[in-house]
Image (cartoon, coloured by chain):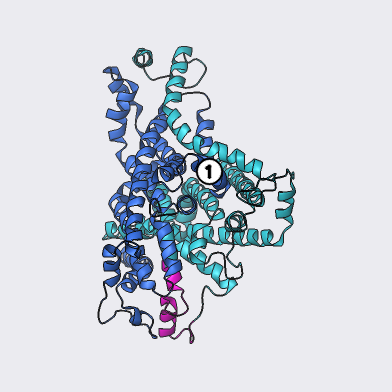
Chain colours: A cyan, B blue
Amino acid sequence: MSVASAERAETSGGRPPQEDGRTPRRRKENQGRLAFWLLLPAGVAVFGVILYPIFRTLVISFFEVTSALATDTPFIGIDNYVHVLTSASFRESMGRTLYFTIVSTALELTFGLIVAALLNAKLRARWLFRAIVVIPWAIPTIVNAAMWKGIFNAQYGSLNAVLAQLGIINEYQAWLGDPATALNMVILADVWKTTPLVAFFLLAGLTSIPSELYEAAKLDRARWPRIFRSVVLPMLVPSISIVLVLRTVEAFKVFDIIYAMTRGGPANGTQTVAYYAYTTAFSDQDFGVGSALSYIIVVVILALSAIYLRLLRRSEMSLL
Amino acid sequence: MKRSTRNSILIHAAAGVVSLLILAPFAWMVMASITPQRVLITTPLRWIPEEFDFNRYIQIFSGGAESVGATFRAAMVNSAVVAVGTVTISMVVGILGAYAFARLRFRFRRATLMVFLATYMLPQIALLIPLYLILNSLGLLDTTTGLILVDCALVIPFVLWILSNYFMTIPDELEEAARIDGTTRLGALFWVVLPAARPGIFAAIMFSFLLAWDEFMYALIFTSSDAAKTLPVAISEFAGRYTTDFGLVAAGGILAALPPLIVAIIFQRYVVSGMAAGAVKG
């Protein structure tokens, strides 16, 4: 193969030159061609599935499509978007989604840091602790939701039983029965499941901190809070940023735990935007508005990610 | 010396508390699945029943056709088929692509990777309606093949991300040595890079298995019968139908959680080293 021979001729001359313009043209083209063929299967498998639907959903969002079998679907421009943006239920579901996203991400990051520190600490049965921590991460979201739905149940739930037997509450509470508490309870269930994932991501960052840094800090007689602030945190900034982006995006799209725990209820108290889009499209059969809604979600997620990535770049600069 | 012992005790105590917080809810679910129904609803709750009741598991494993058990067992098989199929395809395709991102210099390399990763930001809901129509016209609705197809599109970007970061940490020299001996690029990928990237590969397998096993929205909309319904959909139907028998839902949930639990506990020791490279480079 020409690729291989070109490579061999080149590597025998020492380290391959980087992208600096002096690279021999032939080699660059050959690498480009090989890269194309290597990436083709991944490209087909990913974009073959999503490209047309993204485009199609955008188109639908400009039409009035009020049934799966609708034959009369007039073009209505941005009316669907106007309808969504001016509706109170959209604004409320957006508020709930932001609340869910901010609170769950903040809690997961805080607890994740603690658990990551423990995972990294000198523990006797470290393998056992790691195996325990991985459990919530492995439990499927729907099973997790069913489990917490049972725990919060008003009649037989174990949360009521624990609190009552400890004398903290006198009467059993319907934890998922009140719109305001229900969302917090869903957040609790989400935090329990997701904190381990966050912890393992942060642990990966922690283990990459050279031990010399700790030793130097100890020689300077630095205390733990100071070591954390001046050594650990700056070194963790890249991992924290990645986790922040991943978790924010995921939390903003939250659907399955809501579906399985509360179906958006009670009184829409846990209805997030993704769930709202789902009911609009599939229960109300209003595909036009549902598509517009999902595009608004896409735009918000893109905006959030752009802000994060900018912050990340700035924080990296400040480290240098 | 004294201070370090005190620290060590504190750390162990904290680890104990965390373990308890993690295990307690799960332990209660396990206990609920083998507690007789009438004991489960008594107040005050008896945490450990006097007699255990394994009927729900028997019901799930031996119930005849048209029973809860039959649906559940079909869902177990479907989930296994979908997860294994998705992981296999995603890993093969992902390894090839990740090698290109990590080792080859070509135009728009970063941009291409970013486009793959950006697909993660699309909510599934934005694709559901057109995907439904496409799968319908291809005759792939309510089939495991259809689910594997759409799940791969979710999983591959993750595999590309984890693996390309890991491949970058493997020293070039290893591969160069092999190529001087006359091995081709692909040969070097299989005989040099892959064996050296074992932790990254295992981390990617674990990630993609958990993702595929957990996938809910596509399965909810694109499947309708025992032919392709996966466990998350079956469990959520269970939970909706048997609201009075939490024990049955718990038993089903535990069985549904077992495969990913086993995979995660076996593979978790690779995950830290496998992601260590990934998380740092991002």
Direction from residue B261 to residue A283 in the image, left or right: right
Image point 31% across, 46% down: which residue?
B270
Direction from residue A91 to residue B189 in the image, left or right: left
Specify whether residue A155 is painted magenta: yes
Residue B130: % across, % down = 56, 43
Mark 1 — residue? B131
Q: Is residue A197 in sight in this rendering?
A: yes
Residue B242: % across, % down = 41, 70
**In which quadrant of the rendered image does the N terminus of chain A lie?**
top left
Residue A157: % across, % down = 43, 76
Direction from residue A310 to residue B136 in the image, left or right: left
Q: Is residue A103 above or below residue B196?
A: below
Residue A69: % across, % down = 61, 48
Q: In this view, does A320 lie above or below A304?
A: above
Q: How many badges with numbers are in the image? A: 1
- Dot 1: within a 10 Å radius of its alpha carbon, few (fewer than 14), some, or many (20 or more) residues? many
Image point 39% across, 41% down: which residue?
B277
**Which portion, as a residue range, is magenta?**
A147-172
Q: Nearer the viewer, residue A43 or A184?
A: A43
Specify whether residue A289 is painted magenta: no
Q: Nearer the viewer, residue A141 or A225?
A: A141
